Image: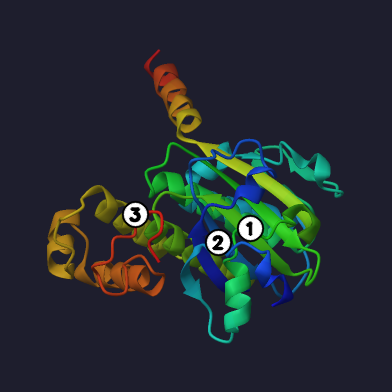
Amino acid sequence: MHKAMVAEPKSRARQLFVAKGVSTEDAERFSDVDSGSFANRYRIVLDCQSEKESVERHRKITVSHRAD
Amino acid sequence: MKILAVVYGHFPDVLKLYSRFQPAVGHLKVVLDVYPAGGFEREQFLSMFEQLAVLFPTISQHTCCTEYESTPLYLEEEEGVSIKRVGETADIAHLVEHLIVDMQISLGGMRRCSGLTCGWKDPENRFDLFVECVDARVGLFAAQFAVYLVTQIMARKKLSLRNELVLKLARYINENQGAAIDAESLSSVLGWKKGNVEMALARLHEFGFFPPDNREDTRMEEGSA
Ligand SMILES: [Zn+2]
């Protein structure tokens, strides 16, 4: 609480689900949006992406190929 | 494998970890403990990918680990397999994340969706999955359904084709908002056996597809607690 004088109130994400057995303290930590040290907290980061366009393009190509 | 928490919000710091994140789009954050620890062997991974690609044909078009310079791990690449394998526990969380991403597009109405699998330093088997999401209801369902499917596969169970019905029903309900969703009506509209509709509805309930009180609007509005 020593930092309470200077710290901004913490922003939280909306909790959709918390498993049984997870303490209130942990649940709050999980929904904290400004941990400020994400890069330091993680050991490994893997990125992924999906785009509908590429999926549709793929389908179109397949279809036109068949039509020819 | 156990989901500890699922939350929805804007995480400014996470935007710095992946350039393809769209700043205006909120994130689903799934805190996941994975056990038993350990990654997939090549053969297991390939057969798993093959099974999942039947249920999620579009995972074959995902891009994966394009900005992985920060990852001090060797990524295994396989021809025809869009998801990279690192040979450690992160593989399992990463697979779950790809399925959540895929469902944001096939069910959640997004045109583009990006995600990150972030492994904690301590405990090493804990992961934060961040996935762009516009409908928390779809996000929560996707997270729980993905964990269920990957758990089934890890237990070396063959994925039942009934899972496809669950996805089809979710898509139908999303695309036909306001339509009757009692088993009787769905059975006649979809031409499915009533037993199949009931099974799929039960799964949707189990995995959080329907809000608890059937009233809450889960489309995100800032500040809604
Ligand atoms: Zn990936």
Q: Are marks 2 and 1 in contact (CB under 8 Å)?
A: yes
Comparing B92 with A29, the one in front is A29
Q: Residue furthest bottom?
A: A21
Instruction: Give me the residue at 21% from left, 52% from top.
Output: B177
| B24 sits left or right of A43 in the view | left
| B127 sits left or right of B25 in the view | right
Residue A34: give its label: 1
The residue mark sitting in front, 3 or 2, is: 2
Reading the image, the residue beneath label 3 is B219
Reading the image, the residue beneath label 2 is A11
Identity, as a three-letter code, of the amino acid under mark 2: Ser
Identity, as a three-letter code, of the amino acid under mark 3: Arg
Q: Quadrant of residue B33?
A: bottom right
Q: CA distance from mark 1 to mark 3?
A: 23 Å
Considering only vertical position in the picture, is A21 above or below B78?
A: below
Residue B14 appears in the picture as rendered: yes
Comparing B47 with B140, the one in front is B140
Q: Position of residue B81 (x, y in %)?
A: 66, 42
Q: Are marks 3 and 2 in contact (CB under 8 Å)?
A: no
Identity, as a three-letter code, of the amino acid under mark 1: Asp
Q: CA distance from mark 2 to mark 1?
A: 7 Å
Q: Position of residue B187 (x, y in %)?
A: 17, 63
Q: Chain of mark 1?
A: A
Q: Position of residue B2 (x, y in %)?
A: 60, 75
Q: Say which quadrant the C terminus of chain A sits in.
A: top left
Q: Secondary structure at mark 2?
A: loop
Q: Quadrant of residue B212?
A: bottom left
